[in-house]
Amino acid sequence: MGKYIFKRFLMMLVTIFIIATLTFFLMHAVPGSPLESDRNTNETVQANLERFYKLDQPLHIQYLSYMQSIVTFDFGPSIKDPNRTVNELLARGFPISFELGIITILVAVVSGIILGTMAALRHNKMIDYAAMAFAVVGISIPNFVLATVLIQQLAVNWNLFPPATWTSPMHMVLPVLALATGPMAIIARLTRSSMLEVLTQDYIKMARAKGIKPMRIVLRHALRNALMPVVTIMGTLLAGILTGTFVIEKIFAIPGMGKYFVDSINNRDYPVIMGTTVFYSAFLIFMLFLVDIVYGILDPRIKLHKKEGDV
Amino acid sequence: MTGKQIAEELARTRLEEGADIDAVDHTGKRGRIVKPKKRKTVTDERILSVQDLHVTFNTYGGTVQAVRGVNFDLYKGETLAIVGESGCGKSVTSNAIMGLIQQPPGKISSKGVHFKTQDLTKLSKKEMRKIQGVDISMIFQDPMTALNPTLTIGEQLTEGVKQHKNLSKAEAKERAIDMLKLVGIPNPDERLKQYPHQFSGGMRQRIVIAIALICEPELLIADEPTTALDVTIQAQILELFEEIQAKTGVSIILITHDLGVVAKIADRIAVMYAGKVIETGDKREIFYNPQHPYTKGLLTSVPRLDLAGGELKPIDGTPPDLFAPPTGCPFAARCPFSMDVCTNVYPEVTALSETHKVDCWLQDPRAQKLIDEQAFAR
């Protein structure tokens, strides 16, 4: 196990290196620079600024210092807002984004699995149809549309929840709902179909023949097997939720990382782009690693590490 | 009933019956040394009585009449083989007894499926669960799929006894280890912690058998227990069945299409065709004196090594469509002896001996003439 984790860790480093390199060159391929603005700046000032931020140096030198900043995890100050370092932005924004993301994932996974399982157990009955109709709607509506509708109805018209910001649990309801509905619908559909398949398996029939209580058959015998495909798509869903947070944070004025990320790209704020991208990708890669570990826990046939003499 | 009680019961019945009158002897096996075996005892205590069992399934294409009036009895300590080709309703029959038919789409009607004194068809699902796995157990065809890949063998073995007999973890574990020993799995202690994929096919079938036996059932339904195994393992598993039956006195319903298996361990045979039992009898009666043309066809279609120029002799034609089964004898269309009456009226049961019963018009005295004529023509 330790060997496996070490190997995965090395792979993760390689992946982050590739992402960082690609980001760097793409970033510089985009026209414009962080120092451009609507006002006409004095050319000497412009040149001095460029020298200060080392933007006048050849690209490969910039690349090296950029790599150095990643290794030391010190991205320096933001160009647009020189009073703040990138690390400060991350430290302030990440906990909030993380909270939003984790709550969303939990809500999506738990409610998706419950909905899908119930639909499968009541196959071709009212609950099944209702759950699947709901799932289709959930998959079809983009989260930004859902977000605005939720704000209009639940916040403005009915005044049930606050429309924006991130201060109390009540504030979290709408953004989480907007962000979780899509993934939840996908998980529900997947759980339902894989549950239906698992319920026809011989080992379920055998459990019935053993006189095991239906509740235990579903929870202990069926669910674990049915969750395998759900775990498989968790990676994709995580990426979706991550990018979803950018939009949702913007709509609900949540002071997470998404705001800095989007702003930094608009402003070509090189250090912030680098910092957020590398941080986000490292986070996502780590979550994918966790998914793989969960896989191994759910299915004993999947070995994360090869023993001596294994085929 | 505990194992001890079973043993006492066995001893008692032996005394009453005056030794093993009906016991199957294991002599006559050529080319090998026969180990002296414990002899099993068949008693006349009726354990299962199936009367006029019908099972239908509603599908988009119409209603399938999978089982159309099956009757049979099973006695304590006896092995009844239900044989027939694919789709003749043997598995559906066993699932119906076991309470594994989902209703709907399935529908069961009968004049009673009595397990000892209880009518299984009248029990609620909850009451049925107290019998499933406890009094009646089932062994499935494919050991590769019958075990849950995500649970340890130990958990799959013990969950039944824990629920039904309220055993503690330690007691259940002890019981599981005993069972694994009984079915011949070495290192049971270690093995309990392992998952199904760590076992070979034959081992898995032994585990499936152990799971079926752990609550000491009185009736074991084995649905093609050796079909998915290779031949050497088949023989081992069949021997295990005989051994267990001798030890525990369990009654076995063996569903199979393999007449070799039947010849080895069955006491009595019920031949099914198109959802009906067309002939029953004890092993000798069916093998040496088959009366129904279908049974005869079935027996001659078995490939034989001892006859030269061995060409397979299949039964021509296909079984009838069970969406609209014929009113007469379902075998009439394939039967070389079919008469006008066969296609129109289902034959009544003819009892040739106390055990040997056949549903065939050829048993009618009026048909005898026809048979003689045909024999003459040949």
Image (cartoon, rainbow, N blue to C red):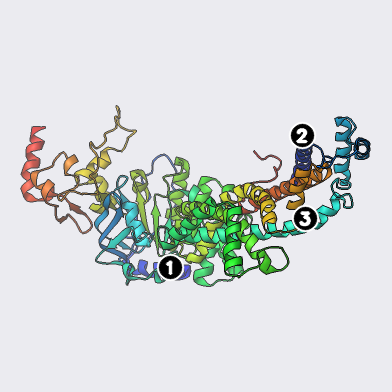
- Residue pictured at 33% horizontal, 54% vertical: B92
**Classed neighbour count for the residue bearing mark 2: other residues with Cα under 10 Å, few (<14), some (14–19), many (≥20):** few
- Name the residue that disc number 3 marks: A94
Relative to B266, residue B313 above or below: above
Find the residue positioned furthest to the front: A40
Labels 2 and 1 in the same subunit: no
Give the image location of residue B308, x and y in percent: 30, 28
Label 2 near label 3: C-beta < 8 Å?
A: no
- Residue pictured at 31% horizontal, 38% vertical: B302
The answer to whether residue B272 shows anywhere in this view is yes
**Classed neighbour count for the residue bearing mark 1: other residues with Cα under 10 Å, few (<14), some (14–19), many (≥20):** many
Local secondary structure at mark 2: loop
Q: CA distance from mark 2 to mark 1?
A: 72 Å
Local secondary structure at mark 1: helix
Local secondary structure at mark 3: helix
Relative to B7, residue B288 above or below: above
Q: CA distance from mark 3 to mark 2?
A: 29 Å
- Name the residue that disc number 2 marks: A31
Q: Nearer the viewer, mark 3 or mark 2?
A: 2
The answer to whether residue B156 shows anywhere in this view is no
Give the image location of residue B3, x and y in percent: 47, 67
